[in-house]
Image: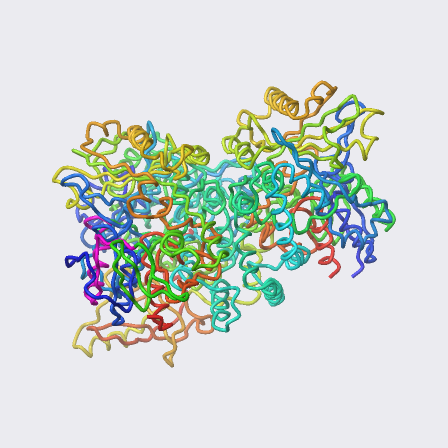
Amino acid sequence: MNSPVLVLGGDSNGLTAACYLAKAGRSVTLLTHGPLGGLASRHEFHPGYQSPGVLGETSGLRRSVVSDLQLEQHGLRFADNAGVLAIGPDSTIAITNSRDATTESIRGVSARDADRYREYFQFLDSVRAPLTQFLNSPPPDLVDPSFTDIRGLLMRGFQLRRLGKALMLEVLRLAPMAVYDWMDEWFENDLLKAALALPAVTESYTAPWSAGTNANLLAQQVTGGNDVVGDGLALTDALVQAARSLGVDIREQTVASIDPGRGVETTDGESISATTIVTSLDPKTVFLRLLRPELLDHGFEQRITNYRARGLRSQLLLAIDRPLKLRDETPANRLRLVSSLASVERSFDPIKYGRFSDEPSLEVYLPSADHPELAPDGHAVAAVTIHYTPYDLAGGWTERSREELTRLVIQQLGERLPDLADTIVGHELLAPPDIETRYGVTGGHVFHGEHSLDQLLVRPTPECCQYTTPFPGLVLCGGGTFPGGGLTCAPGALASRVVAK
Amino acid sequence: MNPTASKPTKSSYDAIVIGGGHNGLVCAAYLGRAGKKVLVVEKRPVVGGAAVSEEVVPGFTFSVFSYVVSLFRPHIIRELDLPRHGMQILPMETTYNPVPDDRGLVRWGDAARTRREIERFSPNDASIYPEFGLAMSRLSRFTKNIIDTTAPEPASLHPKELIKLLKLAKQFKDFDGDMRYLNLKLMTMSAVDFLEEWFESEPLLPAMAGSGIIGTFMGVRSPGTAYVLLHHYMGEIDGAYRAWGFAKGGTGQISLACARAAQSFGVEIVTDVGVSSIDIANGRARGIVLDNGDQVSAKTVISSLDPNRTFLKLIPEGQLDSDFTASIRRYKNRGSSGKVNLALDRLPTFAGGREGDHHLRGDVTYAPTIDYIEKAYDEAKYGQFSRNPFLNIVIPSLNDPSVAPPGKHVLSAFVQYAPYNIREGAENWPQQRDAFGEAVIDTIEEFCPDIRDCLIDKQVISPWDIERMIGLTEGNIFQGELSLEQLAFLRPVAGWSRYQTPIDQLWMCGSGTHPGGGVMGAPGELSAKTMLSKKAV
Amino acid sequence: MPIESPFHARTSQLCTSMRWKDWAGYFAVCSYEPCHEQEYFAYRHAAGLMDATPLFKYTVSGADAGRLLSRVMTRDITKLRVGRVTYCCWCDDAGKIMDDGTVSRLDDDVYRVTAAEPTLHWLRLNARRYQVAIEDVTTKYGILALQGPLSRGILGHVCGRAVTDLRFFRLTQTTIDRRPVTITRTGYTGDLGYEVWCDSADALPVYDAITEAGQNYRLMPAGLDALDVARVEAGFVMNGVDYHSSNHCLIESRKSTPYELGLGWTVQLDRDPFIGQSKLREEKQRGSQWSFVGLDYDWVAFERLFARHDLPPQTPHGAWRDPLPVFDRTGRQVGQATSGAWSPTLKKNLALASVKRSHAAEGRELLIEATVEFERTRTPVTVSAPMFFDPERKRG
């Protein structure tokens, strides 16, 4: 089994899979639509200013991938004290990789919560082992379990049970909960709760009061580690270097159609034959756009169609004509502008009716310190992630609605970062449909499908939940497979094992 | 029912059941049937708890709280011979969804007629509707396995428990693949996401999704509501799925039938007797102390009250370890619904111009759009009752003339959302109650323009009133939310799902235990059977 | 409550027996006279006129209409030429049959589908990525089935050459009494016959024109009871009787495949993928578990059963639909007869049955359950092809 492999998709997962396969001795060709890195890639959004991509957060990057692919030899470095600055209406908390520093920062708002924060992590540490084991192994097929799956499930159950009866039951209780309730069980400070929980609720059509969001929080917290210096872009760069050094043939070509088992056609009319195709494109793109409808079973087509990927975030890219200085002295290059879980919940409510909130929850990424090349000398770039904005905005994403959202966001930024507003010299708003077009992700959903409980356990559908698909020779390796989207490189690594078999 | 005393005849019993709700009565009846000397102590003058009928307005009998029957376990009806004791369930054939400025949607017993009704809104939905029903009934068959037995204990290493788990796994595996997947999704998805895989049109979507929120403090778009939807779809009388009904004479008749059955087995029931505490010595329950200070002893004490009331109000402090108490404290009650019962001079006119009253004999759900329900929820989330609430209405007098004087009617509206914790604080509900009642009647007016002309009298019940009247903490009608982390082996507290408590010889049998709320009888029955098999009584 | 078909004003006048049933939500006549026998003979010896409006009808149009239907149906509909009709069935992913019906190609991009069950959602769900419009036209059109050896003469009278020249499974668009109609040479009686589609608004004049022309041909209004006998003779399977739509089955064993129902001839495997293809291919290679057969009662033995009770043999009145178990000679159950009838034409007692393939060879003797005077017993039957009656004139 040393036939050549065609990898479709130049994002972190595509690159990861390509590297693993090349390392295993396969000859690998990788086709990328647009720049390498996918959601973590650059583009010029204002003359002289470049975007750092829509995904930057790297704390979920799997250490096993880093060591397997020797990414540190390709320039990857971990920051030992990076993190997030939560900015509330009247206080700030720096949540960084350093627990001690974070605890001290929390003490500024609540002494009780500072102590609780330590206990919270003690609890997470106590359950970390079986959960990470679960998240770092190929998922069991829950719908149609084979003998191996059942053995695997029993193993996982046993690992969980080894925590002791009480902890096992506690984990089972936590997963289906709403983050709101769990955060409430731990902490009293609204800003802290919101800052910790925000990333767990924005990957799906959910808000803090939605049941099941706690599973996300747990998964993020137990797999979270130090960030990469330079974040998503640096990860992309390291992966590309690794791929090149492993001899991966990288081409910038867009796939127009896939003929499983045979090969692909590109938009420029080339036919590339390949018996093994591994793709990190999102499942809906693969099955509902690139494959002829006749090839799909009725049931499979329904399930893929029903796979939920409703993009809910927009990004506002800001070109700033001076170096950005944060209010506090902190190593954080990311900000979360929230007030409370209720305020996050409120920013979610309007999307149910096809509108965006007057007070969206914002995250700001400031890449310039690590990536001066993104802006002219002495200038800076800020990438503002806006939660939540509907893909199907009532009335459509017109010039007017875009302007309104931009104005709203800049005004809100100004309230908490007063120096910022006057320094903006250019901007670009990427609404969910723009993210869809620019990065080729269905629905503009940056995680290739919502992280709801059902879609995490069986991702994306029962027939594809272990990376293989109903089509021999076609394998999925993107965020639309277990354990989900984000810059973790886990799906790419796990999928490549399936191909190697 | 035989007249009840307000004083126990003996000073000692085999078992004392605290609370004469339907679960307490079912539990007592099963214990009595096994030959035990049982006392049931009910604080109110009538038995039934949340399943009571009362003549609130002279001549009009209201099913004050619970108003329809669906989940009552058929085997309990058989085993306790409830029809002989007066239980009679009248079928609810139709579901009517009024829509402003339209004839609305009626789903009938006749499949072709239902199809044509739905066709007016979506030919596609009409075509797929029967298949959905089939899928749900198949799913119910699996879930029924869970409801009709004690909860599995995944953390136990006891061979019996492992076998039970394996059996469940086997039942799951015997399902076909589509159903397994559907079942998995059902457990976690929102009602709307789940239904939108099948349907596209309003008012069908909101009408169906509405049953996913009844009694929960969640919206139709909240994950987890698809399961509640199935829970309600599972309604089963006489073994027929999705068969809802009215108890003749009101829901209270079910409790009375259970009480008579219990009495026929020698169970003694006292009413108007409050319990002030459970008498515990050396970590073991010995009996109860009544409000008047009297002590009654028993080998076993069983509480049908909700977990919060049982463990935080009736048990003297210091008897429970702090972890357990903390778990009870974080157990979510959060009442979210209210009830408005109307005595009507005549049948009001429903807008839309349908003739006759056939379509009104079942339930009338007012939820014209998904957004309508969701907006009602959004208001409630931040501590306000919904100005335009979701309504589930029944007019039992159309089926059962015994509940109202001739020609007059009873209309009973289940209202959501009415959060217990309003912004002003729950204790301020009395000041909000009138406004709440008016909001409900205003909403009814949207499809019943002459409702106010027909009105003789009304009873408005907020969750705060529910708590005050029948003791359900925060007015939660299920004795605790039916959310995944509070179901099965996690209900009410992980490790204590088998009706036992950390106090020796103190047991639970209410809706706060597996398999949860609804006029189902299952917790009472399973609890009694567990006690009997463990020789705990 | 069932609704009225557009022909109801006429059929209700004629239905003196008051024998009605609910057919797909419509009032449908079982028999116009108290006994269906005359109506049956009309089908076989003159002509019978039946209201077939309750059939579900869909129009599928657009650039990808043929592609969609080919994906759904067991036949390659892209090969169906304009002006032709084909009988076919459709299956789920597992190759289990959901329904059967006809597809007519009215124009390059316009098809019409008939079905016994609501099928709109199935077509729509499979059409998400096609350029097609699917319309439920069930109430838009009325259908009259004019069946019997004299039907050609009658229709020729009202429509002329367009119909007399119409070949088996072809369609023509013409007029009756100046009203546009589509006439297909198809039917469910296994005899010469036509089905006339008209706009619901034109139903009565079309009905009147045909009845008037039929006067000299002894045309009779005929109901479902007579049809049922005729279709058993013709060996036509019926959804809900001889098989069940797979999407309405609670259990696997209730489902069937086209091969098991003798509809293998409608399955075209070697073409672009269609729904159920891979499972049907597997079944074809492996061989089916069940076969659909005709059963011919051994008359002498049948007579003897009744003679034991001193009774003359009692043949069923009309067609029956309550399944009866079928056994091999040793008494082991090998299948079930799903419908049957006494054939007044062939003078035979007949049944249609699903039996294990191992017992399906023509000429094989099996036993079928029979109840005489509350006594349950078994009587011999011989396996035959299900198409008991197949006159030359049907195709000619």
Q: Name the side, left or right, on which B481 lies relative to A485.
A: left
Q: Residue at x 79, y 54 (%)?
A: A20
Residue C341 at least partly seen: no
Residue A188 at least partly seen: yes
Task: Count all numbered tags in the image, as a single digit.
Answer: 0
Front residue of C155/C183: it is C183
User: Is residue A222 a member of the stretch shown in magenta?
Assistant: no
Q: Quadrant of residue B87?
A: bottom left
> Where in the figure is residue A249, as x and y percent of width and height?
84, 46
Q: Residue at x 28, y 73 (%)?
A: C299
Q: Name the side, left or right, on which A78 lies relative to B382.
A: right
Front residue of C51/A30: it is A30
Q: Quadrant of residue A451?
A: top right
Front residue of C88/B365: it is B365
Q: Residue at x 15, y 57 (%)?
A: B3
Q: Name the side, left or right, on which C273 lies relative to B4.
A: right
Q: Quadrant of residue A449?
A: top right
> Where in the figure is residue C281, as x and y percent of width and height?
57, 60
Give the magenta-colored segment's residue range.
B248-275
Q: Is residue B220 above or below residue B510?
A: above
Residue at the left extreme, as displayed: B406
Q: Is residue C153 above or below residue C236?
A: above
Q: Name the side, left or right, on which C33 lies relative to A300.
A: left
User: Is residue B267 a member of the stretch shown in magenta?
Assistant: yes
Front residue of A321/C330: it is A321
Q: Quadrant of the N terminus of chain B?
A: bottom left
